[in-house]
Amino acid sequence: MEDKVKDTIQTGSDKWWKRAVIYQIYPRSFADSNGDGIGDLQGIIAKLDYLEDLGIDAIWLSPVCRSPQDDNGYDISDYQDIDPMFGTLDDMEALIREAGRHHIRIIMDLVLNHSSDEHRWFQEAKKSRENPYHDYYVWRDGVEGEAPNDMRAAFGGSAWEWVPEVGQYYFHQFSVKQPDLNWENPRLRREIYDMINWWIDKGVGGFRLDVIDQIAKEPDKKITNNGPRLHEYLRELSRETFQKADLVTVGEAWGATTELAKLYSNPDNSELSMVFQFEHICLDQIEGKEKWDLAPLPFMKLKEVFARWQTQLCGRGWNSLFWNNHDLPRIVSRWGNDGQYRVESAKMLAILLHGLQGTPYIYQGEEIGMTNVQFGIEDYRDIETLNLYRERLEKGYSREEIMRSVYAKSRDNARTPMQWNDEENAGFTQGTPWLKVNPNYTEIHAAAQVNDGDSVFACYRKLVHLRKEYPVFVDGDFRLLLEDDENIFAYTRTNKDSRLLVICNFYDRTVRFSLEEDISDMELLVTNYRETGSAGTLRPYEARMLYLKK
Ligand code: GLC
Ligand code: CA
């Protein structure tokens, strides 16, 4: 086989998304153009220059389709229309077009595990057992007047809801307003493919697939994720839709192991481009419990998890790289330091992640080092947070204890409005924001950072551009260094003609190190301190990314 061909097969470096950096927008919190307090599509269009300056290749847009907003749009009532809160279908087409002019593709969020209970299909489905749409959802008879089994929904309560009209329960893994779709029904699958192809024809650049590992459920056996038919469905889905265009597809898969990820992201393109896996991000909770049951981050385990995913998927799949999204707390507050070392630690976390193999994702506000918030419970809006608060109060937890969990893990940490400038409401809206702005916006905002070469923003911009310039970011092999060091995360990425070395102090104390290899010839690509440090020590949160052409 010709070398070039072989190379392409091994690294898949022909794929645009292997060199790309993707930026996630949570539309309701990004930019409000009409003063109703909710971010919208025209708001995003107005910020495309900012995003082009950052250098990102694509925007993953959290759901903007028509929805009663029980779970902020992850409950879709019409997959082929835009929610009026965000704009119109014309606005969506304008966004795709305008983003294209800025060399940015639009990735839609497909919520295929469930729809809204207000979707036309469900409205029909609950009329009678004979209705043609009935079987689009997952129904079971009760057992002795009770729900079929004791399965629980992710947002609290039973996973079964009784519908008197049909005398059956429907299954919902999330809220009662998010009935699960029945993927066993081929007519439902066909409707989904037609809908996806309609979006592809509109020119979208790809899709993020919400909780995709949960579509092949078998509730009678209490199987929620990784059901037996999952990969069969995914291959059919991919064949009928994604493979017709040069798209990026990323599945959300909480239950993915490296073995499963190799199936999902097989370089033969039979399923998806990559998955979001959460092994690293679930480390700071008590094992076997919920995310609210806080535990300190086991740093050595974090290194082990990253190293395993990096080596296992190399040449056999593809990683997604992320610290943040709309469901996760802000990384600088979580594993960095949002006090004295906010800027240093935000940059360190960026440098650590962006040197790895995979496609990096930046969640809105991460690029300026936005932090968690601490509101009174009455100011939270997230359904998961509010249900948790109620449930734990009933179970006898103290308010203080619950709020500690909420401050650390509530999804609203990531959902406070984007901090654009130091004007009222951080420049997000002229009206009253749907969720309060983080009071630290007077200090932390984009306007102060875009023209400052020392800002967190400048560091992200640099990292995004480096990935395009140096092929080693895409195809270099990963090797963990200083494996037993309890403070430092260090690794190399090596390809046939160059080497990248990343070394990061994860903590707020100065540490010493010595590497086996001589790094004195290497060029410093990025760091997070202005004054050059000394060779064998790292200052608090100090990070260096070095490069050598062999
Ligand atoms: C995913 C989404 C989350 C949503 C859930 C149900 O985990 O990221 O925001 O609540 O699916 O759709
Ligand atoms: Ca608006």
Image (tube, rainbow, N blue to C red):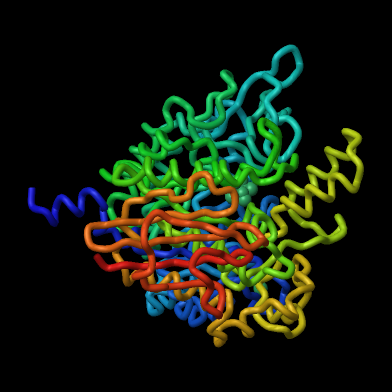
Splitting the image into 4 quarters, where does residue 521 fall?
bottom left
Left or right: 179 in relation to 544: right
Residue displayed at 54% across by 41% down: 279
Left or right: 431 in relation to 221: right
Q: Is residue 495 above or below residue 231?
A: below
- Viewer-proximal residue among 131 and 221: 221
Residue displayed at 74% across by 37% down: 156
Residue displayed at 71% across by 65% down: 338
Residue displayed at 84% across by 38% down: 392
Q: Split into 4 quadrants, where in the image is the C terminus? A: bottom left
- Viewer-proximal residue among 192 and 231: 231
Regarding residue 119, the answer to whether it shows in the image is: no
Q: Return the x and y of residue 259 as percentages of the image width and height.
A: 40, 34
- Viewer-proximal residue among 342 and 48: 342
Left or right: 388 in relation to 66: right
Q: Is residue 169 above or below residue 291?
A: above
Q: Return the x and y of residue 211 as percentages of the image width and height.
A: 54, 42
Q: Return the x and y of residue 306 as percentages of the image width and height.
A: 48, 46
- Viewer-proximal residue among 37 and 90: 37
Question: How many numbered discs?
Answer: 0
Left or right: 507 in relation to 492: right
Regarding residue 59, the answer to whether it shows in the image is: yes
Splitting the image into 4 quarters, where does residue 103 fall?
bottom left
Q: Return the x and y of residue 205 as percentages of the image width and height.
A: 38, 62
Furthest-left residue in this view: 1
Furthest-bottom residue in this view: 451
